Amino acid sequence: MTLRRILVGACALLVALTTTACGSDDAPSGPLPDASTLIRDAAAATRDIESTHFTIEVTGTIPGLAVRSLDGDLTRSGEAQGTGTIEQVGQLVEVSFVLVDDTLHLKGPTGGYQEIPAALSSSIYDPSAVLDPERGVAKLLTSLREPRTEGTDELDGVSTYKVSGSLAKDVLSGVVPGADGDADVTFWLSADDEHLPVKASATLSDEASVDITLSEVNAPVTVEPPA
């Protein structure tokens, strides 16, 4: 598998980082809101996101996905930059990446950035999928089956509602290349009026899961080709 395919597949899942949720006295009180309403509001808010910081943590092995972690910034147009860890020939390799003008620039532990041809980069992973309303996080939200509001949590100082359900393989694979079956998924949605997704966690098997988080939504992001 090419490094481009590895990176694109990982980024698309927007899409993150492992943040431990814990109960908080500051969490919303009173009756829990209807899950369907939360999901509807969250999907609408996600469609309006222009940029975000994202992190991805992969636990276990997912066929076709060599990325173990990603941490970077992403724009709706698909530009992205950051760092990550990928598995290559059984070894974990630290990389830096810049995706701009449909060209992936990749830098390993040594040497400078290498430009990955467009033909190869398109086969790796498309980070723009994370914010794409037809296949990204918004699509995951609207496709969640039997959603239920399970409680409240606080993540990194953000009060959230915890909503769980399941996703079909064909929907999940839009952001998690290598997903070979349906998955149990939990979203943590902000408790404010927009209910933006703060974190998503997908359990693909007893040994494999993916956590994605979004933060610094709509903060200015500038991605330029490396010098």
Image: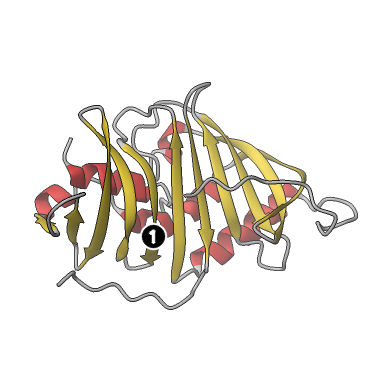
The residue beneath circle 1 is 72
Image location of residue 53, percent across then percent down:
45, 63
Depth check, front residue: 22 or 116:
22
Image location of residue 178, percent across then percent down:
34, 32
Q: Quadrant of residue 73?
A: bottom left
In this rendering, the answer to whether 46 lies above or below 141 is: below
Depth check, front residue: 126 or 169:
126
Q: Quadrant of residue 79?
A: bottom left
Q: Residue at x 38, y 50 (%)?
A: 70
Q: Is residue 153 left or right of residue 76?
A: right
Image location of residue 207, percent across then percent down:
49, 23
In this rendering, the answer to whether 90 lies above or below 191 is: above
* Colour setup of the view: secondary structure
Q: Is residue 130 left or right of residue 38?
A: left
Q: Is residue 197 left or right of residue 208?
A: right
Q: Is residue 57 left or right of residue 83?
A: right
